Amino acid sequence: MPTPNPTLTAIFDAERTLRAEERALLKTAPAELQALLRTAVEEAKALADRREATLRLERLADLCAQVLGSEMVDALIAILDDDEASVRVQAAEALVDVGFERYAELARGFERAAADGRRTTALQELPWVLVEIAEPSARGLIARLLAHPDVEVVASAVEALAELGDAAAIADLEPLRDDERPIELDDEDGDEALATLGDLVEESIAALQGEQD
C-alpha cells in the first residue's frame, strides 16, 4: 500500500474538520448565530489585511446563505459591496441561491439596499442577481436604480433590464434617452470605449424592441 502523501492528508483532515465545525456552528440558536455572523462580516470588512479579509468574506458568504433571516441577506449585500472580484462572485452566487429558495427575503433586501443607496459596488451587482433568478418583479426592482445618483449603478441597471428582456422596461428607460453622463462601454473587441448613458439606453431600448418583434 502506498505511503499517504502528508500534504494531501493534511488537506483532507482540514476539510473534515471544517465540515464538522460548520455543522456545529449552524446548530447555534438562530438569533445568536445571526448576530455572530453579522459581527464577523463587519470585522472582516474592517481588516487592513486584504488577503485575510478575502478569505473570511468568501467563507462568510457561504455561511450567511445557509441562515434564514433578513439580517443575513443584508450581510450578504455588505459582502457583495467589496472591491475584491472573488468576494463579489461568492456573495452573488450565495444571493442567487437565497433568491431561488427565499425570493421574498432577497427582494426586501434589494429594496433596503436601493433605498439606502450607499453600497454602490453592491448596487452594480444586484441587478444581475435578479436577472439570474428572473422573477416577474425583477423589472420593477431593478428600475428603482435608474434614479440613483451614481452613473455606474444606473448603467448596470440599464444593461440588466435589457438582459432581462421585459419590453415593459422601455417605459422605464425612455426618460434617460438624452442623458449625457459619460460611461465606459466594452466595444466589439472587448476594449473600453467612452460613451454616454444615453447611448447605452438607446442600445437597450433597441434590444428590447427587438424582443417584441
Image (cartoon, helix red, strand yellow):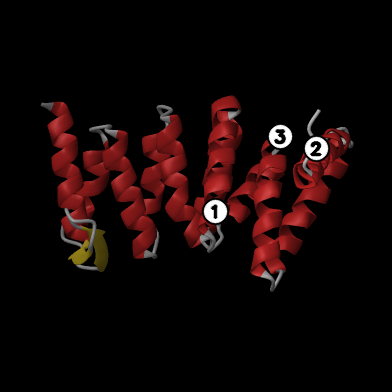
Q: Are marks 1 and 3 in contact (CB under 8 Å)?
A: no
Density class for disc 3 (Cα within 10 Å; few <14, some 14-19, many ≥20) is: some
Q: N-terminal of the two: label 2 or label 3?
A: 2
**Residue situated furthest front in the rendering:** 1
Q: Nearer the viewer, mark 2 or mark 1?
A: 2
**Residue situated furthest left in the rendering:** 213
Q: N-terminal of the two: label 2 or label 1?
A: 2
Residue at the image point whose x is 71% and y is 37% from the top:
69
- If the image is split into quadrants, where does the N terminus sit? top right
Residue type (three-letter) at the residue carrying disc 3: Gln
The residue pinned by badge 3 equals 66
The residue pinned by badge 1 equals 86
Relative to 15, say whether 74 is above or below. Answer: below
Q: Label 2's element?
A: loop
Relative to 192, say whether 18 is above or below. Answer: above
Q: Label 3's element?
A: loop
Q: Which quadrant holds residue 184?
A: bottom left
Residue at the image point whose x is 18% and y is 65% from the top:
195
